[in-house]
Amino acid sequence: MQYIKCPSCNGSGEIFMDDLGRPFQCDTCRGNGILLLPSRKTLCPKCGGTRVIFLPTGFSSAVQTDCKTCEGTGFVSA
Ligand SMILES: [Zn+2]
Ligand SMILES: [Zn+2]
C-alpha cells in the first residue's frame, strides 16, 4: 500500500469547473488530495485513476461512463 498524489486534482483536493466557474471537491480522492494505491496495482492508464471516462456523443457534448479498463476502480494490476 502506498499513498500517491491524486492525478485528477494534482493533490489539491479540488477541481476547478470551468463550466461553473468555481471549484468542486475532487471525486477521485474525495477531497483528500491523495489516493491509497493498493499493493501490486497501478493507476489505470485509460482514466488516470478517475474511474470514469468521457465518451463524445456529438459536437460539444460527452457522456460520463465507468472506465471499462479498470472496471471503475481506477487501478489496474501492475
Ligand atoms: Zn483528487
Ligand atoms: Zn480506468
Image: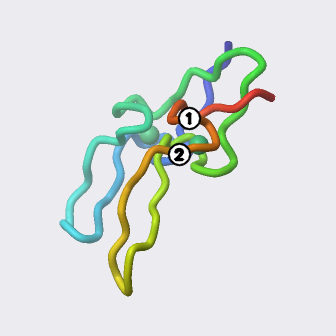
Q: Position of residue 67 (x, y in %)?
A: 53, 45
* Structural crowding at the residue carrying mark 2, measured as other residues with C-alpha within 10 Å and reported as few (<14), some (14–19) or many (≥20): many
Is the residue at mark 1 in contact range of ligand 2, meaning its CB lies under 8 Å from it? Answer: yes
Residue found 67% across the figure and 37% down from its top: 43
Q: Position of residue 37 (x, y in %)?
A: 63, 23
- Amino acid found under the numbered disc labelled 1: Glu
Q: Please tell me in which quadrant of the rendered image residue 75 appears.
A: top right
Q: Position of residue 57 (x, y in %)?
A: 39, 74
**Number of the label disc, if any, that sits on residue 67:** 2
Q: Tell me if label 2 and label 1 are in contact, CB under 8 Å.
A: yes
Q: Nearer the viewer, residue 39 or 21?
A: 39
In the current view of this chain or complex, which residue is farthest to the bottom?
A: 59
Residue found 35% across the figure and 52% down from its top: 15
Q: Position of residue 28 (x, y in %)?
A: 43, 37
- Amino acid found under the numbered disc labelled 2: Cys
Examine the rendered structure and indicate whether residue 22 appears above or below residue 2: below
Examine the rendered structure and indicate whether residue 2 appears above or below residue 46: above
Query: Looking at the image, in which quadrant does ligand 2 appear?
Result: top right
Q: Secondary structure at mark 1?
A: loop
* Structural crowding at the residue carrying mark 1, measured as other residues with C-alpha within 10 Å and reported as few (<14), some (14–19) or many (≥20): few
- Relative to 66, is 43 on the left or the right? right
Is the residue at mark 2 in contact range of ligand 2, meaning its CB lies under 8 Å from it? Answer: yes
- Relative to 6, is 1 on the left or the right? right
Q: CA distance from mark 2 to mark 1?
A: 6 Å
Examine the rendered structure and indicate whether residue 44 appears above or below residue 38: below
Examine the rendered structure and indicate whether residue 59 appears above or below residue 43: below
Q: Nearer the viewer, residue 30 or 71?
A: 71
Residue found 53% across the figure and 30% down from its top: 73
Residue indicated by mark 1? 71
